[in-house]
Amino acid sequence: IHRPSILFLDEPTSSLDPSATKAVEDLIKTATLEGTKIIMVTHDIGQARRLSDEVIFLNQGKVTEHGTSEQVMTQPSSLAAQQYFSGQIVST
């Protein structure tokens, strides 16, 4: 319980104010440095940039991108990811 090998987080900072978000992100960074693998779901692109090494992008329940954070966020190959990371609002 105190040092899990994997930690699954689903929107861990949803509805938190900025200072509480920073505190949670600091805990996540510390856990990562201590060797815990973090698997996190987030819609917060900034948070994903701050915390991730690797990104899996899902669109309509299917993996459409998988790679390093830099690669997926700056050079996505799928149209859905390109639109999402550029801030376009697209109806499906």
Image: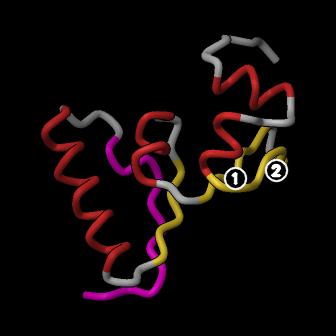
* Disc assigned to residue 10: none
Question: For this rendering, which residue is in front, 70 or 19?
Answer: 70
- Around disc 2, counting alpha carbons within 10 Å, would you say few (fewer than 14), some (14 to 19), or many (20 or more)? few
Q: Quadrant of the C terminus?
A: top right
Tags 1 and 2 touching, CB below 8 Å: yes
Image height of 30 relative to 21, above or below: below
Q: Measured along the vertical axis of the image, is residue 81 above or below residue 63?
A: above
Q: Percent position (x, y) of residue 11?
A: 43, 47
Q: For residue 56, which numbered disc appears in the image?
A: 1
Residue that appears at 19% across and 33% down: 18
Q: Which residues are magenta?
A: 1-13
Q: Earlier in the sequence, mark 1 or mark 2?
A: 1
In the image, what residue type sits under mark 1?
Ile
Q: Is residue 12 magenta?
A: yes
Q: Amino acid at mark 2?
A: Val
Residue plotted at (82% across, 50% down): 63
Q: Position of residue 58 (x, y in %)?
A: 74, 44
Quadrant assignment, res 9: bottom left
